[in-house]
Amino acid sequence: MRVVFIFVVILVLLGMAVPMAFAVRYWLDGRAVIARAEQGGALRGASAERLTVAEHTIAMNEFRETWRSRAIPCRTLAYLWNDLTTESGPRTMPVSYKLGTSLLGEQRGTSVRWQVRRLIVSCQLEQRFDDRQLLRMWLTQAYFGRETFGLENASQAIFGKPSSALNGEEAARLAALLRAPSLRGQPERWAERARLIQERVAPRAQ
């Protein structure tokens, strides 16, 4: 009996150790992803100053329901859990989730390993940066169509001025491109989508 008991205890301990080993491995992998991004300049210390009109418009269009919210252990996990288990959860993902996706680079969205890595990286980003910082870091990499990456590049290419100088209509036009970059070649649909975004975005309250 004693031998059987010891054997069962060993099995239980192994069963606990294996998931823990995987968790540690993924956690360290996430830290390595963020470290590489920092070294490459993708996570330069974005200031937490007041958002510009363009930044606010994009934040409220993309992340309204999760913006500056809190969850334990992190919003990304809470978002995914609500998405799987309820019909009333937030319909917009946290900005950390978007940035985590960008940092991983390899687009293997159906891979379980890739999904776990993205979750870990997103949670680690939430621990280190606030939403304004995360938004600004994501916007330096975001795609706006026609091989244009980054909010500043898009603003200069389309409007010929810095993003801080954009008005509400112009900001909404850029926000529309984040979900449908092809709109740049469809002026009427682009204008209509921008109008709807302007109507949906609440007054600035940061």
Image (cartoon, grey):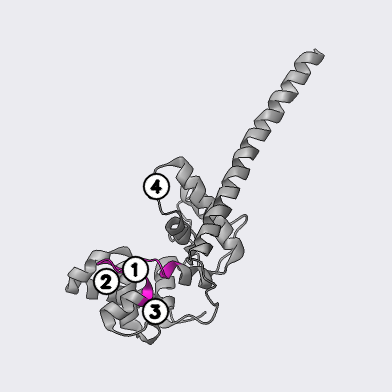
Q: Earlier in the sequence, mark 4 or mark 1?
A: 4
Q: Tell me the distance, in whole angstroms, between the alpha carbons under discs 3 and 4.
A: 29 Å
Q: Amino acid at mark 4?
A: Gly
Please state the extent of the stretch shown in magenta in the rendering. 138-152
Q: Nearer the viewer, mark 1 or mark 3?
A: 1
Q: In the image as oriented, which residue stretches furthest toward the front?
A: 39
Mark 4 to mark 1 CA distance (whole Å): 21 Å
Query: What residue did someone put label 1 on?
Result: 149
Question: What's the distance in space between the residues labelled 4 and 2, CA to CA?
Answer: 27 Å
* Element type where label 4 sits in the image: loop
Q: Position of residue 69 (x, y in %)?
A: 56, 66
Give the residue number, with chain letter if any, for mark 2: 193
Q: Nearer the viewer, mark 4 or mark 1?
A: 1
Q: Which mark is residue 160?
A: none
First of labels 2, 1 by sequence position: 1
First in sequence: mark 3 or mark 4? Answer: 3
Mark 1 neighbour class, 10 Å CA radius: few under 14, some 14 to 19, many 20 or more? some
Residue to which mark 3 is pinned:
54
Report x, y in % for residue 19. Answer: 62, 37
Decide: few, some or many residues near mark 4? Use Cα within 10 Å; few <14, some 14-19, many ≥20: few
Query: Callout 2, which amino acid?
Result: Arg
In the image, taking residue 181 as reference, residue 109 lies left or right, namely: right
Residue 114 spot, x, y in % from top left: 46, 45
Which of the labelled discs sits on residue 109, or is there none? 4
- State whether residue 164 is above or below residue 142: below
Which mark lies nearer to you, 2 or 3? 3
Disc 2 to disc 1, C-alpha distance: 20 Å
Question: Which element is circle 1 on?
Answer: loop
Q: Nearer the viewer, mark 2 or mark 1?
A: 1
Secondary-structure class at tag 2: helix
Q: Classify mark 3: helix, strand or loop.
A: helix
CB atoms of marks 3 and 4 within 8 Å: no
